[in-house]
Amino acid sequence: MRERYSELEKAGLNWDPPVLESANAPRVSIDGKETIMLSANNYLNLSTHPKVVDAAIEATKLYGVGSGSVRAIAGTMDIHLEAERVAAEFKGVEAALIYSAGYTANVGLIPTLVSGKEDIIISDELNHGSIIDGVRLTKAQRAVYPHNDVGALEQLLKDNQDAKRKLIITDGVFSMDGDIAPLDEIVKVAEEYDAMVFVDDCHGEGVLGDGRGIVAHFGLQGRVDFEVGSYSKAMGVQGGIVAGTEQMRLHALNHSRSWLLSGSQPPGVAAAQKAAVEVIIDEPEHVQRLWENTHYFRNELESLGFDTGVSTTPIIPVMCGESSTAKHLSSLMRDSGVMVGAIVFPMVARDKARVRTQMSAGLTREDLDQVLSAFEKAGKSIGLI
């Protein structure tokens, strides 16, 4: 372990997470210094919303801090079922099942959907690591198509049309580039070749489709078999979820080991999950502000001369090329009181390093202008613009 960590340090690839001394909000305290947060997934700024916080407190007083069991034995409470009911209605589907995290939804559900070499999983090359881990746990054949290349996907479906089960898996919003999957085209070819569609929409929930996600964004309700999401991002809480048919729910809760063998969500968390969904429904201005901030910030960055890649969502990368440049830019921004992350190899290709920014509905125009000023100064000092 010592040798491996030393190698990471020498390559500059080791993680040294900053420590927050406050709630994860648009302005946070890090090392005693006020910092504008542009590295959080808290897109709608709901982690401190009074309705969400109060729901968690009241449920904790009523039910306690933990459930005391896994869901399958004695850990299912009425508050869990209520949170799932509200989520299913929100998504426009028959049923939903809550997992401990988006990661456990992927690694637990994917292996149950295929059996062996007679099946094939076809996956986008830029899919999240949790999808990759879930695929590794299967014995199915695997094929990877170039990012968002539906033509290549269709060719793979043609080449494997005799497979017993065909499962297409894609992210909805890709977390490093901020672009979205052409899910409408993917569903079209999937239906033509009798393939199942599995979308991980963890970064699309609360963001696309008036907050309902990429399936609603494209109007595909009822045509996507498995819609995985996360309460840990735009919802501001914690946990994962899969939405679809009632048969899908019954299948998942009977076969998904990460659900069967994990302690259930604390009651306060389940209540907060329900409350967060209700806030998105009742207070659409949060989603509206998120997109207003997104359009303003991306346009201003580009007008300064920065390259924001192919982003079309609140994930806005500042492309740097070399890893050293991204790290230098991130460090200068941190010194200026702005928290942004350097995304470097091996998370992205060697020549695709970037500093990733993520918008929040809670950021004010003053916050964004302060960040833009810091980017302009730092970008000029290192010759990026």
Image: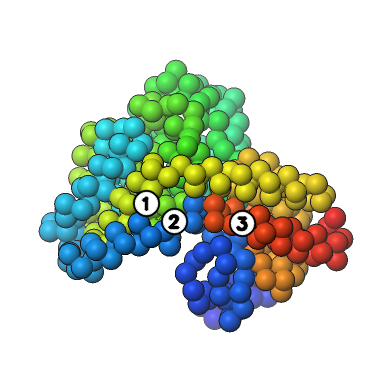
Q: Nearer the viewer, mark 3 or mark 1?
A: 3
Residue 327 in which image quadrant: bottom right
Front label number (2 vs 3) = 3
Q: How many marks?
A: 3
In which quadrant of the rendered view does residue 372 lie?
A: bottom right
Q: Which mark is residue 364?
A: 3
- Tell me: 168 left or right of 381: left
Residue placed at 22% from the left, 47% from the top?
82
Q: Secondary structure at mark 1?
A: helix
The alpha-carbon separation of the residues under discs 1 and 2 comes to 7 Å
**Screen quadrant of the C terminus:** bottom right
Q: Is 117 placed above or below 188 here?
A: below
Expressed as whole percent of the image width and height from the top left, the position of residue 137 reads: 38, 50
Q: How many angstroms separate mark 2 from mark 3 (CA)? A: 15 Å
- Amino acid type assigned to the residue bearing label 1 in the image: Ala
Residue wearing tag 2:
46
Q: Find residue 340 and report its image quarter.
A: bottom right
Q: Amino acid at mark 2?
A: Leu
| On screen, residue 33 above or below 229 | below
**Are circles 1 and 2 on residues that touch, CB within 8 Å?**
yes
Q: Which of 159/281 is in front?
A: 281
Q: Label 3 is placed on what type of residue? A: Thr
Q: What residue is pinned by disc 1?
A: 276
How packed mark 3 is, by other alpha carbons closer than 10 Å (few <14, some 14-19, many 20 or more), is few
Q: Is residue 37 left or right of residue 10?
A: left
Q: Nearer the viewer, residue 63 or 9?
A: 63
Q: Earlier in the sequence, mark 1 or mark 2?
A: 2
